[in-house]
Image: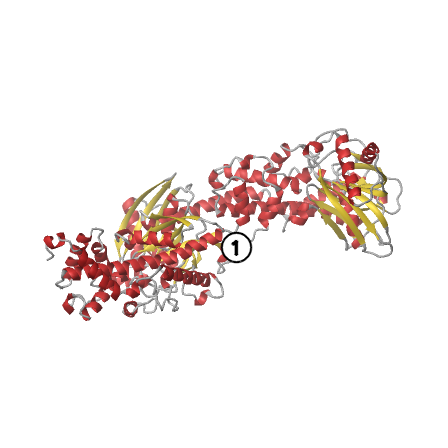
Amino acid sequence: MLSSSLLANNHTELHDDQAHKVDKYLHHLHLSDQTLMDVSKRFRREMDKGLCRDTNPTAAVKMLPTFVRSTPDGTEQGEFLALDLGGSNFRVLLVKVGKQEVEMENQIYAIPEHLMRGNGSELFEHIADCLANFLEKLGIKDKKLPLGFTFSFPCQQTKLDESVLVSWTKGFKSSGVEGKDVVSLLRKSIKKRGDFDIDIVAVINDTVGTMMTCGYDDRHCEIGLIVGTGTNACYMEQMRNLELLDGDEGRMCVNTEWGAFGDDGALEDLRTDIDREIDAGSLNPGKQLFEKMISGMYMGELVRLILVKMTKEQLLFQGKTTAMLLTTGSFNTSYIYAIENDKDEEGLVSAEKVLRGLGLDPSVEDCIATQRVCQIVSTRAAHLCAATLVAVLRQIRDNKAAEKLRATIGVDGSVYKNHPEFSRRLHKMVRRLVPDCDVRFLQSQCGSGKGAAMVTAVAYRLAAQHAERQRILDTLRLSREQLLEVKRLMSEEMVRGLSKQTHEQTSVKMLPTYVRSTPDGTEHGDFLALDFGGSSFRVLLVRVQSGKKHNVDMHHKIYSIPQETMQGAGEELFNHIVYCIADFLEYMGMRGASLPLGFTFSFPCHQSKLDQGILLKWTKGFKASGCEGQDVVMLLKDAVRRRQEFDLNFVAVVNDTVGTMMTCGYEDPKCEVGLIVGTGTNACYMEEMQNIELMQGDDGRMCVNMEWGAFGDNGELDDFCTQFDHIVDDCSNNPGKQRYEKMISGMYLGEIVRNVLLDFTAKGLLFRGKLSERLKTRGIFETKFLSQIESDRLAMRQVRSILQHLGLTSSTCDDSVLVKEVCSVVARRAAQLCGAGLAAVVDKIRQNRNLNQLSITVGVDGTLYKMHPQ
């Protein structure tokens, strides 16, 4: 025995000397930071292989989809069963999830050795028997509860509740299970009993269970790590990187199955003769090579083999081995925990006790050397684990394009929990290798069984939330029948607008524009154009060369209109416009010139001739006084006279829709329809004169400005308007007006989306029910955000950036996916409503000409049409 006096003596020199000898002997087990970074990079490459559809079949690290799409958000509630199978014991749990609290009852059952290596059917029948026993004890056998199944072996999942065992590990060899769906086998065994029923909702492995357990306590937890009998990790990966599955939005937990890292030779330069000896004597030679360098199942055996080798080389125990020392598995991994006690003396006492238990007669030097071997083996394990963990952290950081990642790692496993130094070494090395990540380690207190219940609870929550969200979004989705009805109603309003008898009562005014023809290509000369339809306007010089079709030279400048001018006196507004025209003529070196002017004025007007337009009402946020009911050409002429700098020959006033049709008509003679979908929306088309009852004469055609934004102002769209449309209308500058435009145009779509997001958040369906003050601000969700969000092909980075701008700094990837869906639904409805209206226009032209089929071109302009990707 080591005497207390000897232990009390200063043996630091002896300790250091022995430790140095062992370090020298086991130098190949010491891994430098540079080597560990290299391992990390290798593992990152292996991750990429596993994620890629083409290389996955041959990849060692399989990166298996788990079909777990979300971590807990704290709102989960209900009663759930969990079954946790991952070793020679398994647990059955009843987990009651309430508001921020979890109650659990559980029972541990053993799996006899003969069932671990025997018939698979018998194994699952034993599990079903134990489950029945548990339900009976708690008096809940008659309840059909949802169950989460933690099955901690390599599996290929095809659904959340379907998982095919790839290969047994951890000493299991039950026949007839590999290649089979373990959920089906469990269901079959339960059905065979026939005395209870359960709803198996999810099957996960212990790593996912750990992540979900810790995720309930820490929302930043998106990595699960197990270092116990085996080792593995999982993390939340972007769907766009997971090529094995269709779909590129949102996230899914990936089970790395990193224990197999190195099975393809990627770690050969780091594996030692001892590692190869361990592998050769295992149940699965050539498999799980990384796990055999790290996990509790092999750590003790690694130490034993080193001690045997050193003894045979006369370095320990005076060169004398014993039968016990030579027995495989005799040096239990738990011995390492005792020997590496943070108080060296106690550790040495434990070392002596263990060595004597193996029939050895150790000296102090032998005990010190044994302690050092244990330290080197467990330190290598911790550092290798850190290297692969760093690869996972870097993957998540790159996915998020974050300069500094804040992440929590949920951890479980006997080695991590019981080894006195393993966790500290792991944490220290991770932080050393990724200083740009703020990493927190959270030890799972309840095992992965609770995690299985949490996966089930999350699945139930997601299903309920999805159903409620879809119910709300369905009000914004239009069926083919509804769109045909919109087309029919638009057609009726068009006819009413063209009729002298019903024109005053109709919502679609069908205003004559006095434009009698589209371009034929012979036009020529210099023309000034003023394009005014929003808070910015353009002044253009257009040079059309004679006899050369499609030869048009244009120069233009864009000018803005201040908000106070839009809302102020009409005289100030037109003075500002004339000032900008003068500036443009100066810019073009044409000061004092007299040119023919075409005036695009994109607001509802009544025209009695080509160069006269009576403003009916302002739209698009304009409220300039003294203009409604006035001829805008006269208002502009008066402003030109007041300036006395130049003269203009006012030839025509048209709206932007007519301007678009004429521009496109110059390129394509078939263009007889103009459409604007921008800040506002409108359409025009060439109508037969005989149908325009407001005009005299039946010959030829004239372009009609529909002013279709007002469609619905008489209640035509009431059956299609949602609560969100009513809110947007009530809060607008012109309640009850321009109802069709408010469902389609860029001025309002952002507001519709914002109100949907507010409703979802108030119902706890988004942003965890937490509103930001900025999102409450009217107009804060700009329509351009819809275009940016739906254009996002960068893993929701654009969406997250916009949400952060709106004060939603803690929004999740799931939130981003949902925001994108809302934008998509609102934009799709706008496009479909616009399409239904356009179908009515095109069909009217076809009917006018008594054609079975019509070939026609629609000229289109507007920011929403041009900028939105869909």
Residue at left 32%, top 66%? 175
Question: Which corner quadrant of the image does residue 282 belong to?
Answer: bottom left
Residue 462: horizontal and vertical position, in percent?
A: 46, 46
- Residue 413, can we see it? no
- Residue 42, can we see it? yes
**Front one among 74 and 386:** 386
Residue 376: horizontal and vertical position, in percent?
A: 27, 60
Q: As displayed, is residue 484 above or below residue 283? A: above
Residue 269: horizontal and vertical position, in percent?
A: 36, 68
Residue that mark 1 sits on? 248
Left or right of 414? Residue 770 is right
**Front one among 779 and 849:** 779
Residue at left 88%, top 44%? 698
Left or right of 484? Residue 529 is right
Furthest residue to the front?
13
Q: Amino acid at mark 1?
A: Asp
The secondary element bearing badge 1 is classed as loop
Question: Which corner quadrant of the image does residue 388 belong to?
Answer: bottom left
Residue 786: horizontal and vertical position, in percent?
A: 60, 45
How does the figure colour the protein chain or chains? secondary structure
